[in-house]
Image (cartoon, rainbow, N blue to C red):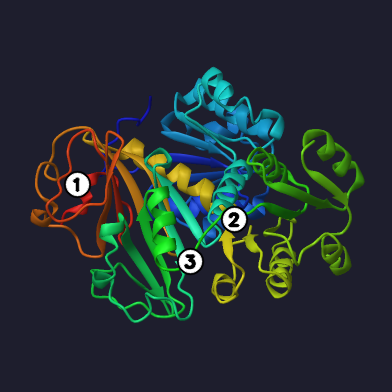
Amino acid sequence: MAGIFSKNDKSLKIIIVGCGKVGMALAERLSHEKHDVTVIDTDSDKVTKATTLYDVMGVTGNGASFNVQNEAGINKTDLIIAVTPSDELNLLCCTIAQKVGECAAIARVRNPDYSDELSYLRKQLGLSLIINPELETAREMSRLLRLPNAISMNSFAKGHVELVKFKLPENNMLVGKKIKDIGASNLGVLICGIESEGTLDIPDGSNVFKTGDLVSFIATPINTLKFFKHIGMKSKHVKDCIIVGGGKTSYYLAKQLTEMNISVKLIEKDMESCEELSTLLPKALIINGDGADESLLFEEGIKETGSFIPLTGLDEENILLTLFAKKYSKAKVITKINRGTFNDVIDGLDIGSVIYPRYMSTETIVKYVRGMQNSIGSNIETLYHIFENRAEAIEFEITEESQVTGKPLMELNLKTDLLVACINRKGKIIIPRGNDTIQPGDTVVIITAHTGFKDVRDILK
């Protein structure tokens, strides 16, 4: 394949078909990482916007057309990413590109009709990756409902380790104490980040906890629960949920929650959609009504519900509904935000957990791109942009010996603003200390304020 064996000091030639929210986010991220990016869209205004904002080339036309792909340079392309609104068009774009250019291909496929067939489609069509933002968003939300104290939660080591963020409440036992004095390591917990008054610290042990700090730590799921109990924040998963909106994400989420024996009420104003959802979700209660109607929300028990998730198509409505739920209930609330603007304003609102579906798709694809670039000695298993994109959490698979293996961590010349947060050794989770070593066969989680790591050796100065 063209360019698949590129080294980590070379950029890749990438074509993005579709300049919607995800396409634009990818153009921004991949051009920032110095890749040679070309965008394709039938809307010339969107193409112009992309080429004006970012260091990318643009072609106006149908991304499934051989002539258009040829104009974009498909025969020299390493990777094509199709993220148009049409699943079928995305699959067709990738199929044509592989026949013509023999490049790697990633397609976005969102229709629930295909949700059980994604692995089959990927294998049969020879795709490198299929992404479903709505399905991944629903999975993230269901994880957060298992741990209501968490604002955000990222999973590593195939679910055996999680990076959890929570807000430190007033009068908590941690307030006023230094990290090194709370005995977190004895509980199998590593404090990875503290966000306070707009600043981010990747701590070294001397940081002092303050009321309102956003604290991030890494631990196994069992030790996460033990840590919350230890600091007086008992955490039990919710028993019921009200969902507003009957779109794809709502369907995926309701399906997962009912399978977890969580009682679900789903409010949707379109009668036809309600009838379809009633058939697809026999264990959920589907209510035909306006989820923005205060009297309906009170009638359906918003004051008593364990969780409330607005999933309308409008960010503004989602935010207002979340603020309403925060005022009248103690429910765990999760807010889905589609746009990437006004982040400073959103961060200043008390709207619980915030999920950006487009960033989830972007992270999955960036991880794959860096995997195409990296050296033979390590592969990227997982990648998250964390702390409002000011840092990265990367899980590397260590496939061979290198400068970072076999030596105690205290002897490695590590970059500043970086933590070796976790070592997974054949299923045994190690929260590392100075005497621990990285070995071939391990997977290692790195938390760093640096960006663009492609190989585990990038942790060294």
Q: Is residue 42 left or right of residue 373?
A: right
Quadrant location of residue 199?
bottom left
Q: Which residue is mark 1?
A: 457
User: At 53% from the left edge and 31% from the top edge, which residue is drawn?
Assistant: 70
Q: Nearer the viewer, mark 3 or mark 1?
A: 3
Residue 166: percent from left, percent from top: 47, 66
**349, above or below 216, in the image:** below
**84, above or below 2, in the image:** below
**271, above or below 440, in the image:** below
* Number of other residues with Cα within 10 Å of mark 2, as a class: few under 14, some 14 to 19, many 20 or more: some
Q: Where residue 264 is drawn, which disc sits there?
A: none
Q: Nearer the viewer, mark 2 or mark 3?
A: 3
Instruction: Return the residue nearer the eye: 30 or 444.
Output: 444
Q: Which residue is mark 3?
A: 233
Residue 241: percent from left, percent from top: 70, 54
| Discs 2, 3 touching: Cβ within 8 Å | no
